[in-house]
Amino acid sequence: MEKMSKYEEFIQPFLDGELSREELDWFSKELESNAVLAEDIRLYREVDSAIREQDVMDLRDQLDVIHNAIGDPSQESVSPSRYRKVLSYAAIASLAILVSLGVLLKVQHNKLTNDQIFEKHYEPYEVTMIYRSAESDYQRVLSQAMTFYESGEFHNAINLFEDILIKDPADMASSLYSGISYMETEQYIQADEKFQKIINHNDNLFVDQAEWYLAFCYLHTGQNLEARGHFKEIANSESSFYSKKAKKIMRSIK
């Protein structure tokens, strides 16, 4: 995927109408000649639109509650005391609208940094494999690799997972755990390669996990457009275990 880092600082100001005339002229020309950039702008707009729609729906729900509490005073005669209550309710409703709009505006700008998102949502994949410790050389090495992985000795785990993958490159479980071990040791290029391998293979049980951790690789290395694309795919996948978590991240990512 084409690297878009040189455009990232201009995308949100472009969408918000905050670019200078010179910057806007330059960015518009780039859009005309760069199909990848144009697609990323479309993706940004879709995400922002989805966020706004959800926030507006939440606001409407709040106003419906207020409306039901007030009732319809036109259907009956209004006594002075009831009139004062209606005015009070109207004042409360107006205040609620202002507060809700303020919250809505705050949400639009309440983006988290990549490090904050990473710290809040990332955690290493738990060991779910059942393995026996000494049936064969493979099982012995795998058992020791998993022990290193679970104890946080990721450099040692990587060495053993790589030994396994030299003998069996199609071992997707070892590819996943080695990829996460590379992430934990901040070797993101190697982690990317492992996750891409799983995704490209496709016919295995770890594609969902590989997509999830690959998105975090992009996020932690500042490749926000790529991260958004992967989190969006995960969020739109009803079968993904990470769908709800991805939706939350999309509301926070810049």
Image: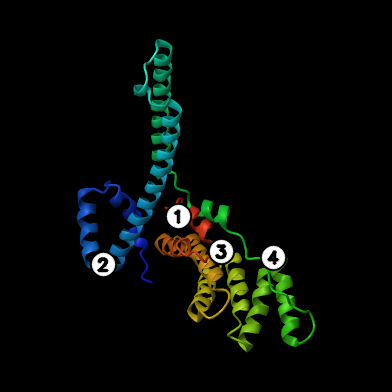
**Residue neighbourhood size for the residue with mark 3, other residues' Cα within 10 Å, grouped as few (<14), some (14–19), many (≥20):** some
The residue where tag 3 is placed is: 241
Position of 104 relative to 182 (above/below): above
* Three-letter code, disc 4: Gly
Position of 83 relative to 189 (above/below): above
Q: Please report contact status of discs 4 and 2: CB closer than 8 Å, yes or no.
A: no
Answer with mark 2 or mark 1, whichever residue precedes in sequence.
Answer: 2
Mark 3 or 2: in front is: 3
Q: Residue 250 carries which label?
A: 1
The residue where tag 4 is placed is: 152
* Three-letter code, disc 3: Phe
Which quarter shows the N terminus?
bottom left
Q: Please report contact status of discs 4 and 1: CB closer than 8 Å, yes or no.
A: no
The part of the image, by quadrant, that contains residue 66 is: top left
Q: Position of residue 207 (x, y in %)?
A: 53, 73
Answer with mark 3 or mark 4, whichever residue precedes in sequence.
Answer: 4
Label 3's element? loop
Classify residue 230 as left or right of residue 45.
right
At x 54%, y 66%, the residue is: 213
At x 46%, y 61%, the residue is: 231
Q: Where is residue 227 in the image (x, y as percent from the top left)?
A: 45, 62
Let me know if residue 106 appears in the view. no
Classify residue 132 as left or right of residue 53.
right
**Residue neighbourhood size for the residue with mark 4, other residues' Cα within 10 Å, grouped as few (<14), some (14–19), many (≥20):** some
**Residue neighbourhood size for the residue with mark 2, other residues' Cα within 10 Å, grouped as few (<14), some (14–19), many (≥20):** few
User: Disc 4 to disc 2, how far (Cα)?
Assistant: 43 Å
Answer with mark 3 or mark 2, whichever residue precedes in sequence.
Answer: 2
Of 200 and 17, nearer the camera is 200
Q: Please report contact status of discs 1 and 3: CB closer than 8 Å, yes or no.
A: no
Q: Position of residue 230 (x, y in %)?
A: 45, 65
The residue where tag 2 is placed is: 34
Of 4 and 240, nearer the camera is 240
